[in-house]
Image: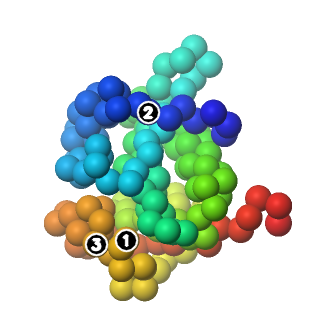
Amino acid sequence: MQNGLKRINKKELGDLKIILLSEGLPVQTIGSAPISFFSINAENGAPLGWGGIEIYNDAGVLRSVVIKNALRGMGSGKKLVKALINEARDLGLKKLWLLTINAETFFSRLGFQHAIRSEAPKAIQQCEEFTWGYNDTAHCMCLKLKPACE
């Protein structure tokens, strides 16, 4: 797959669920919502991190971005998010939304801007990420995606 991403198949979702739970992230709908999860791997094939894109028409939610603890601060997160942004663009999405409790500076460096949660499309406002109790105080952010040819 382009962008250095590897799509996670259904059999791998169980392992991903454990990783997400260990990070305190929601997992109830990872097998049923319109989400594609990806990993980004080192040259030797070892996973460095994971993330997902949940799609609602021409908008999406960046879901559950996790980098292995030992690799944080070394550029893997930036590489993963940029690859997920490119994947969202390739899918024809126009906006990518996210919620974050403690990484707004990281995401703003990648082009995301603070947004008002109620301005997200209704389907996104009703998805697990946006209705999960722990995200009541999370910062809402949005990235307007330009087509790759611009």
At numbered mark 1, what does the secondary structure look like: helix, strand or loop? helix
Image point (44%, 46%), residue name:
36
Looking at the image, is mark 2 or mark 3 earlier in the sequence?
Answer: 2
Image point (17%, 66%), residue name:
133
At numbered mark 2, what does the secondary structure look like: helix, strand or loop? loop
The percent coordinates of residue 48 (x first, y second) are 48, 30
At numbered mark 3, what does the secondary structure look like: helix, strand or loop? loop
Q: Which mark is residue 126?
A: 3
The percent coordinates of residue 134 (x first, y second) are 19, 63
Q: Are marks 1 and 3 in contact (CB under 8 Å)?
A: yes
- The quarter of the displayed image where residue 125 is located: bottom left
Q: Which mark is residue 98?
A: none
Q: Residue under circle 1?
A: 124
**Cα separation between marks 2 and 1:** 22 Å
Residue 122 vs residue 117, the one in the foreground: 122
Q: Residue under circle 2?
A: 8
Question: Badge 3: few (under 14), some or many (20 or more) residues near its Cα, within 10 Å?
Answer: few
